[in-house]
């Protein structure tokens, strides 16, 4: 069965990681899009920080996809204050991931994806999180190793 990639990217960095992994997976890619884009970095910070601090979930367009036949979902997001953006978590909470495998990947300035996994697990319920991947400006890129592991996992779960 084919996997799917679901992502949010404000500045394009996370989308680039999705495109790179999809050169191998060749699967459907769907994006979560805030109704009002966050814009350049400082503008995004100015808006997102009070939203995060006050538990505000920005309005967004959810991708129009059918997950019923999908068994592995790659989820990509930028790290915002050590977590996935609130509206990404909100979208995930509203899906049924029962029995599915989740492979999360993130991009960040320096943070690791690990800090975001607790809230991610809460959002995806009983789904199994495997092979989380972080790409940050200050860390050696281990993309090729991750790509290999993802390919192996997908072959095993076919
Ligand atoms: C609101 C906001 C919060 C952020 N919080 C963090 C953070 O906690 N740790 C970090 O390393 N980078 C943080 N960043 C940087 C982004 O994670 C990083 O630039 C990311 O690669 C952007 O991905 P994108 O281009 O796909 O949107 C933050 C950026 C924004 C706009």
Image: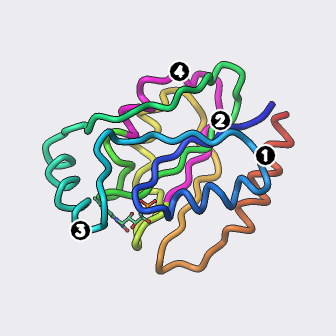
On the picture, is 111 further left or further right than 49? right
4 vs 1, front mark: 4
Q: Which portion, as a residue range, is magenta? A: 88-106
2 vs 4, front mark: 4
The residue depicted at 58 percent of the width and 26 percent of the height is: 65
- Which residue is disc 2 drawn over? 101
Q: Secondary structure at mark 2?
A: strand
Q: Earlier in the sequence, mark 2 or mark 1?
A: 2
Q: Earlier in the sequence, mark 1 or mark 3?
A: 3
Q: Earlier in the sequence, mark 2 or mark 3?
A: 3
Q: Earlier in the sequence, mark 2 or mark 4?
A: 4
| Mark 4 surroundings within 10 Å by alpha-carbon count, few (fewer than 14), some (14 through 19), many (20 or more) | some
1 vs 3, front mark: 3
Q: Is-magenta flag for residue 100?
A: yes
- Quadrant position of residue 47: bottom left
Q: Secondary structure at mark 3?
A: helix
The residue depicted at 58 percent of the width and 22 percent of the height is: 98
């Amino acid at each position: 069965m084919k996997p799917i990639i679901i992502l949010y990217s404000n500045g394009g960095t996370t989308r680039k990681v999705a495109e790179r992994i999809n050169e191998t997976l060749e699967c459907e890619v769907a994006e979560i899009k805030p109704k009002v884009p966050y814009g350049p970095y400082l503008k995004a910070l100015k808006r997102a920080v009070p939203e995060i601090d006050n538990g505000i979930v920005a309005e967004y367009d959810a991708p129009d996809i059918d997950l019923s036949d999908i068994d592995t979902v790659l989820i990509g997001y930028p790290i915002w204050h050590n977590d996935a953006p609130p509206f990404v978590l909100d979208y995930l909470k509203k899906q049924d991931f029962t029995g599915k495998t989740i492979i999360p990947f993130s991009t960040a300035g320096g943070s690791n994806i690990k800090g975001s996994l607790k809230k991610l697990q809460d959002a995806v319920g009983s789904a199994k999180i495997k092979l989380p991947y972080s790409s940050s400006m200050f860390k050696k890129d281990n993309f090729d190793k991750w790509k290999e592991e993802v390919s192996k996992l997908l072959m095993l779960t076919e």
